[in-house]
Image (cartoon, rainbow, N blue to C red):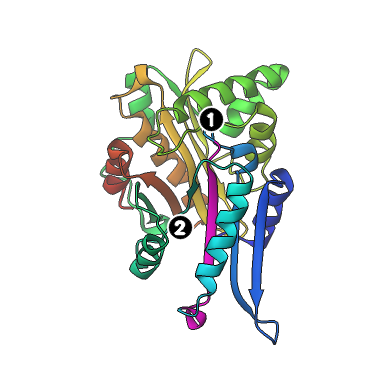
Amino acid sequence: VQTAAGFRRWEAVNPMPNRLDLVVTDANGALVALANVGDGGVWAQADHGYRGNLLVDRGRRRRGVGRLLARRLEAYARAKGASRISAHVRGDEPEALAFAVSLGYAEYHRRYSSYLEVPVFDASPFEAPSAVAARAGVRLATLGEAWAERMADEEAFLRHLYDVNNALTKDVPFPDPFEWPPFDFFRKQLLGSPTLDRSASILALREGKVVALTFTDVNESGIGYTFMTGVDRAERGKGLALALKLRAVAALQARGVRWLGTTNDEANAPMRGINRRLGY
């Protein structure tokens, strides 16, 4: 659930000048529909694909509003030279998928959002993260701890963290061409976010180098979200991803967070398996 404050913060750091926003209201000023399409700004795709969103109030559907907006979005993207338009449809709204298909769109990928109820989570069936780390020969530290330790060479540490995150992200089975935005955006939008929980963002370090990580956000509504969990290829099969997530959940329990969410691509079977084991 995104808060208004979170939305404003995102808009400030990624204003996306190549975006069209449309709003439809009735004669009384009540919101009927909203839609947008754009190149993603700093998240622009290598093939110049555009992303679109369209939402019509349930009570105002089947009156041609959605179709009219969709064609307006497509015309704008076409004029901007977009190679394609992609959009997401909720899995519990089959009528939305049918509408998209009627416009000529086709499903090509699925992602799953899942949540863990943090207060009732029981870590006792799992091996302690410290034991997993000891066997793997790495040290687990919170982002806050590791950052404080490297304040003398903060710039080098943050750039190393950026490079590691960028490399690990390339192994996520995203359906579209993907590259992390520049370092300055990573530093400001992710590491500089007031909602990033440095105590629940966990790193695995080998000789001072990050070999695995998980980043955790807790928004203004108190809902946690895992943005990324990744392990270096040479360190996989040692249980580090599970250990990182266990340590993050423990930190969120101490903070009193109730829900921890995450989103995974259908093809990301290893991470989805870990989440199932944890009870997402």
Q: CA distance from mark 2 to mark 1?
A: 29 Å
Q: Residues within 10 Å of mark 2 (few under 14, many from 20)?
A: many
Q: Secondary structure at mark 2?
A: strand
In the image, residue 52 sits, relative to residue 244, either above or below, namely below
N-terminal label among 2 and 1: 1
Kind of residue at badge 2:
Trp
Name the residue: 71% across, 44% down.
Answer: 13
| Tag in front: 2 or 1 | 1
Name the residue: 59% across, 19% down.
Answer: 160
**In magenta stretch: residue 244:** no
User: Percent from the top left, x then y, of residue 11?
Assistant: 70, 51
Label disc, if present, on residue 259 of the rendered structure: 2
Name the residue: 72% across, 17% down.
Answer: 152
Q: Nearer the viewer, residue 135 or 85?
A: 85
**In magenta stretch: residue 52:** yes
Answer whether residue 240 is visible to the viewer in this image: yes
- The magenta region covers 48-61
Label disc, if present, on residue 179 of the rendered structure: 1
Q: Is residue 178 left or right of residue 130?
A: right
In the image, residue 234 sits, relative to residue 212, either above or below, namely above
Q: Secondary structure at mark 1?
A: loop
Q: Is residue 1 left or right of residue 275?
A: right
Q: Nearer the viewer, residue 41 or 225?
A: 41
User: Percent from the top left, x then y, of residue 178?
Assistant: 50, 33
User: Percent from the top left, x then y, of residue 207?
Assistant: 49, 12
Q: Residues within 10 Å of mark 1 (few under 14, many from 20)?
A: some
Name the residue: 32% across, 20% down.
Answer: 135
